[in-house]
Amino acid sequence: MEEGFIENRATSVPFAGILADLLTANLTQRSEKRAVYDNMRGTVAIELVDIETAVTLVFAAGKLRIEEGIVGRPEIVIRTASDRVMDLNALRIVGGLPWYFDEAGRRVLSHLVSGRLKIKGLFTHPLLLTQLTKIMSVM
Amino acid sequence: MAKYNAMTQEWLDAWKQKIATSKEYKEIAKNWEGSVSIIVNPDPEKGIPEPIYVFTDYWHGDVLDFLICDKAKAESARFVMSGDYTRWKQVAKKEVDSTKALMQGKLKLKGDLTYVVRNIKTVNKVIDLLCEIETIWPDEA
């Protein structure tokens, strides 16, 4: 994979490093995820409320910049706790869409219903959210 | 229940025995392949004058070597987790979630993160079983 396809500008935020490592591994190992990534455009913020950490992911067709904090006006903002954010990585992709009908999917739905997971842009930016789920999923 | 001094071979043997006899672990870990090292950074004030290196090895629900080892052996593991003594103690006492500690950078992981996330239930089960061991901590003895 070519150098510089993920630019992590939030090097002082450990969570940003974890995201960058995870995405690098996923996109390197899985060509179908790379194809999705190459078409992504938009901005997503992830806030881990319990550890007061936030990063913003700026996708620009094959490039990703990770910024510290919530920068600009992200189309999607995901707010959850640090020990739940990895539940999103456990979602399976079935027929090109996130699958909510197994244990991992039901856990994410339960977090959404209970308010432990909040996603701003869930209904207004479904394509970007689906693309994000696809590239973040490790399943 | 017997008590074991933390980070000794006896403590590791007790942990290994817990895992080896857990039917739930065997089922959850049936796909796990590979070794995990724990590096405890030195903290002389807490009774840890030198780094401690622990090597643990797992294979499809079976438990292999559980050893206090040297740095080279620890670094040969498929996954290497490192952190301060206080943080490891909090994890082993269930005072801190290991995922949260990773996100905060208080524990560090070397190795394929996607594999760990795919198998997070196995990791959590191993930690849960560690938490069940009656442990004497060097700074509490």
Image (cartoon, coloured by chain):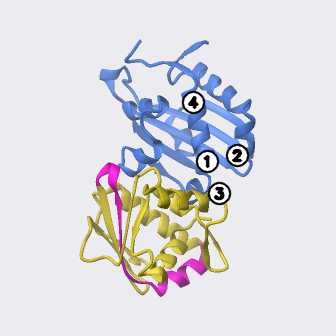
Chain colours: A yellow, B blue
Residue type at mark 4? Leu
Q: Which mark is residue A103?
A: 3
Residue type at mark 1? Lys
Q: Label 1: which residue? A: B121
State whether residue B75 is above or below residue A91.
above
Q: Which mark is residue B28?
A: 2
Determine which quarter of the picture holds residue A105.
bottom right
Q: Are marks 1 and 2 in contact (CB under 8 Å)?
A: yes
- Residue occupying the point 66% across, 65% down: A101
Sequence-wise, the earlier of marks 1 and 2 is: 2
Mark 1: give few (<14), some (14-19) or many (20+) Cα within 10 Å.
some
Instruction: Give the CA distance from mark 4 to mark 2.
Output: 16 Å
Instruction: Give the CA distance from mark 4 to mark 1.
Output: 14 Å
Q: Label 4: which residue? A: B130
Q: Quadrant of the C terminus of chain B?
A: top left
**Which residue is farthest front?**
A113
Badge 1: chain ID: B
Q: Secondary structure at mark 4?
A: helix
